[in-house]
Image (cartoon, coloured by chain):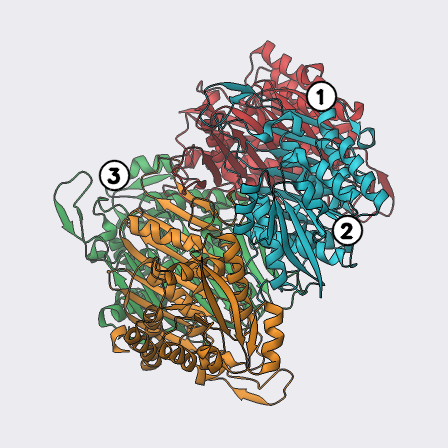
Chain colours: A red, B cyan, C orange, D green
Amino acid sequence: MKRLGVGLVGSGFMGRSHAHAFRAAAGVFDLPMAPTLELLADVNETVAARAADALGFNRSTGDWKALVADPAVDLVDITTPNTLHKPIALAAIEAGKPVYCEKPLAPNALEAKRMVDAAERKGVKTAVGFNYLKNPMVALAREIVASGEIGEVVSFRGIHAEDYMTDPKAPFTWRLDAAGGHGVVADLGSHIISIARFVVGPIESVVGQIRTVTDKRPSGPGASEMRAVEVDDEARALVRFAGGATGSLEASWVAAGRKMMLAFEVTGTKGTIAVDHERFNELQLYTVGQPGGREGFKTILAGPQHDSYKEFCPAPGHQLGFNDIKTIEVKALITALAGGKAFMPDFREAWEIQRVVDAIVQSAREERWLAVTEI
Amino acid sequence: MKRLGVGLVGSGFMGRSHAHAFRAAAGVFDLPMAPTLELLADVNETVAARAADALGFNRSTGDWKALVADPAVDLVDITTPNTLHKPIALAAIEAGKPVYCEKPLAPNALEAKRMVDAAERKGVKTAVGFNYLKNPMVALAREIVASGEIGEVVSFRGIHAEDYMTDPKAPFTWRLDAAGGHGVVADLGSHIISIARFVVGPIESVVGQIRTVTDKRPSGPGASEMRAVEVDDEARALVRFAGGATGSLEASWVAAGRKMMLAFEVTGTKGTIAVDHERFNELQLYTVGQPGGREGFKTILAGPQHDSYKEFCPAPGHQLGFNDIKTIEVKALITALAGGKAFMPDFREAWEIQRVVDAIVQSAREERWLAVTEI
Amino acid sequence: MKRLGVGLVGSGFMGRSHAHAFRAAAGVFDLPMAPTLELLADVNETVAARAADALGFNRSTGDWKALVADPAVDLVDITTPNTLHKPIALAAIEAGKPVYCEKPLAPNALEAKRMVDAAERKGVKTAVGFNYLKNPMVALAREIVASGEIGEVVSFRGIHAEDYMTDPKAPFTWRLDAAGGHGVVADLGSHIISIARFVVGPIESVVGQIRTVTDKRPSGPGASEMRAVEVDDEARALVRFAGGATGSLEASWVAAGRKMMLAFEVTGTKGTIAVDHERFNELQLYTVGQPGGREGFKTILAGPQHDSYKEFCPAPGHQLGFNDIKTIEVKALITALAGGKAFMPDFREAWEIQRVVDAIVQSAREERWLAVTEI
Amino acid sequence: MKRLGVGLVGSGFMGRSHAHAFRAAAGVFDLPMAPTLELLADVNETVAARAADALGFNRSTGDWKALVADPAVDLVDITTPNTLHKPIALAAIEAGKPVYCEKPLAPNALEAKRMVDAAERKGVKTAVGFNYLKNPMVALAREIVASGEIGEVVSFRGIHAEDYMTDPKAPFTWRLDAAGGHGVVADLGSHIISIARFVVGPIESVVGQIRTVTDKRPSGPGASEMRAVEVDDEARALVRFAGGATGSLEASWVAAGRKMMLAFEVTGTKGTIAVDHERFNELQLYTVGQPGGREGFKTILAGPQHDSYKEFCPAPGHQLGFNDIKTIEVKALITALAGGKAFMPDFREAWEIQRVVDAIVQSAREERWLAVTEI
């Protein structure tokens, strides 16, 4: 079987998660190529060597350019801080190597578009890690919509709310640095936008509202000095889909008590779907036409009849975890690299998502409806 | 004990519900006045007589003006079709009699304002039947917010979604008649607006989106002729509260499967509240500062420690029903009429609610943010 | 319409609830007779007079025998402490008057049987207030089972758990007095037994376990003196139904946090039903044979298509409360008295329930399986 | 770091799961030894070779005895059909090698005891795969009980219900072969017994009920010939714990609609815990003494403050899956083999669990209470 040499840049949480997923995918799925954890790059040799050892990579380097150039590296996998996504991706594309990049591609749609153009010019395959699109229950939602089981989509309500920035004394982090892009609308909002597009379709126009709830935070852990926060802590928008549906999107990282409320409800002319990632192995489904007195939403538990589940477990209801979702993502990536079904979301799709992010922010600042094509 | 002669105009579902509530309130609560079902008016003598008999009224009439003028009628209670609310209320006010009117007061804010002005000039007490404000769990939400238990309010998400117009073949009804006012944004949206104002406070500005999903319906039950629908089937808005909080509101009567999803979530700087009226005897509460590894939303079941519950049942968890909520409303009304705590929402508050309804529609039509004071 | 003169003995919580239900039933339902709150008896004239005034009875008396004998009393309604149920009921039966008695009929099956025999000899109609059997969702469970929608019943798990005696310092009350019968197995266990019989059918044999968790309690509120508790704080049993199904029953009044967990699950060869009275307007239903990948329990919300709901509210999902259930009970009673469908549970059924209660206790004491017919 | 050569016997679902767990554990946790997938044995060379290739083992063999004897195998891991557990385990023990065996150890307690004795005589470390004990929420339940947060345990209700044998036409399988031991009481019941012992403590006596619901099944897939079923399809028992608590246990594989209802509720004198594995990343906790009007069960979502979670994900609410639980099990095993905290459950604990299984069956057959020590 053909070998796929993985070159990973970055070894933080997402780096670990990717390494785990490559290793797990080989055991769980019947893959068309054999991924090898070939080379790991990090900020310097020492850090990289330690991480390579911990994560099971064959070799390490302190120079990501060397990684890109390394002949044993067939795939460049980017899990660095966001500001490095672009230069590394462009270098990999230039070298003709496929790229697997964590979201967001770039701080704004303009820069993301340049990455799309570069990749498409070179004909390089790309993939972006919008994990939750690989949740079998999200795939099921898309399938139900596409099959017409709930009729035509009337509306969509999407929320991604967590609470990791609720404490006003939580210190400034890279997430709050406006140089890296927008705030929660990019960090979490992009996930719910990705689902909206995946399940319902393109978004045509938006009117947004953004807000910085805590406008000064300690400049670092334990710091007494304060630093101004310029990015949004919460954001929401009304949207119109190209297909005619309407809806709303919402993102917050100050939603006290919500740990993983990536939730959406799709209302169709003949039924409704609801999913909440705090219970992401479940999908609620209502269809019109049930017998009188027996109507209700049903709770479908993930099981072997749903996408990619049975390879993890032959029995329903046993649940997949976050890392399993990432393992499914890696399976889809390797399948695509081997010539199978194209991976989605690719750079182009990530750019489309970023356009909606930017449109929400700009429409909020200008206090008006904005066509996404204006971005 | 002083007697309160009730004169009810209208004997449809809400008329029955009011009659039931007056009767029930006398048994459940220790009231300061004794309500008597004195006189019932309906479209003609026959209908009125039959209804008076069924609902236990002493007398009946086919002429609401006679009811207003009747010396034994101390309170004029209006549950007629919406278009009659205004003339009856104005006549009652003119006669110096307190008015208890079902929502909405009037088809638009302008007409509602005239009713407010009339009542305030005359010094007549008024009450409007926004039932759900009397749900003890909604009162609890207000109390938790007011006490600062969840800190300052950051955001509010409010939804009232039901599905009674989902079927595109469901015939035209008075609810769809634009002469009576707006569509679902008035019918259901007004409920969630009333809660937003009750729990969080005044709404300063909005940007709305409205949509008629089914634009033609059979003109009546079994009719083959079609009639155009001009009012909204679904509506949503972004809002800014005067106190600084942000949020969204949503209303739909085509939300397949949702039977009574009057749901809201209030996020504060120190906690979050969530309520859904499909389970309206419950309130979800999260507060920051719980012990590590023991953090979570708690599900509070309505019980005797909550507003107006213990008179129904001494034990928690036994649940109140929709009609009990209406009974609490009547208790509050009689208390106010007897000189106790003023009843809310009165006509002025109903007008404020209607202004938000109108603002959502106007901002949707003009595709722009609108200050509620522009209405 | 024929008048039904109600004579109520007792004016505690259940007395109030009955009075409320008679008044409410007349407004909510189209009854075949007109109930009149005619006469109220309590421990003495003063208490009775005050209660009659509060609950809206025409007259009062300090002597229940006078009530039984009163010619204007057509129905003797007993909501006294348990020890008085028997003498009052027997007197009413002797007088040829129908009896509506709160559960339990008597402290044990033997005494209950005497009441059954007396009533049947005299041909007097009887009714016992096992409220929850009138919950439309319990009626729906019975209907689903009877129709074969879930095949043949395989097993039943029934629980009634509350927590009002959890605190070991909660003082001794009449509920703990062994003279009045057993403990929680009678107080709450009888409810779940009544449901088991109603939904599945007769219980043939049991093996029980009972336990007094707190064996000494303050003899009264604020008392320092302690009194020994002899009755059970929790009880459970394995059961065999006459129809072949198996199952378990459980009762506890020391189930910390459970406020109204009257819950049951019926498993059939083709499906499963689950109900929990903390959300008693819902029924969970699973049936085999759903399409692949779309299988799940559905949550059915109470609505107008279910028994007795539409008279309270024309729209689904608006919920009934505890007192509404009691109102349905009263409607069924008046219907039966007017010659309609017989009321269930009558004294005979209450005796059958009591036999299971006694069988659980005796089998627990003797540590063996016991046929219910041994009682 | 010291190498741990894993010899796996069996490559069905559990074999795959073990292989996955060893590979994943190395990436997720900081292990004291480096597990190597050294040798895989299966029924013959061909099957073993194919499985070794798919699961990433270095070598393969058709002879488990060769595996036990292989000098590079440091750990004998048994995931064969149940009837082979004993001979392989005894051989491994004889060879002085630690054993990791899937549940159940043996068809009955007597044979399990022989395996315990052999292991203890040889001083060999043993581990049995009762997966769910490694669920962080089950560990949390144990911790809450042990810390006294819910006071003294009063009662325990445990259920393991699934529906994979609901269809009466589902063919005969090894699970139904009485030669391999009991039916669902062993297959699923052992899991809930393991949790009862882990969270509450030893079980002293039981009275059981077992039933074969479908007593004849097609002898194989598509077979027209029928084969008699002798083992139990459902089982339940009342139990007394050595510490004084009471409770019930239940197991069913014909529980239509239940996919992974491994659920338990522990009631203490000061609070209650509830867990259901259909949502196994959640624990419901109620404690007495909450502020008035603010009492409720809280829903705790698994997060980094709970056992073994943070190595999978730094953020709460992201959920672990079934395979992650198995990965935690392998981590605990390797830690124990390296001299750290002893692994539980070992063979002795598995024998204790099996005694309860056997006691339930025997007490059901003899229709009497049975002390577990009688087994």
Q: Tell me: D221 left or right of C218.
A: left
Q: Is residue C166 above or below residue B184?
A: below
Quadrant of the drawing holding the N terminus of chain A:
top left
What's the residue at 63%, 50% (across, down)? B39
Label for residue B42? Answer: none
Pinpoint residue B132: horizontal percent, then vertical percent. 64, 47
Q: Secondary structure at mark 3?
A: helix
The local crowd at label 3, few if under 14, some if 14 to 19, many if 20 or more residues have their Cα within 10 Å, is some
Residue B365 badge: 1
Q: Give the number of callouts.
A: 3
On the image, numbered disc 3 is attached to which residue? Answer: D45
Q: Amino acid at mark 2?
A: Gly
Q: Which mark is residue B151?
A: 2
Choose between C255 and C352: the one closer to the eye.
C352
Chain to which mark 2 belongs: B
> Whole-Å distance between the Cαs marked 3 and 2?
68 Å
User: In whole angstroms, how far apart are the C-alphas of marks 3 and 1?
Assistant: 75 Å
- Disc 3 or disc 1, which is closer to the eye? 1
Q: Chain of mark 3?
A: D
Q: Nearer the viewer, residue B89 or A347?
A: B89
> Mark 1 falls within which chain?
B
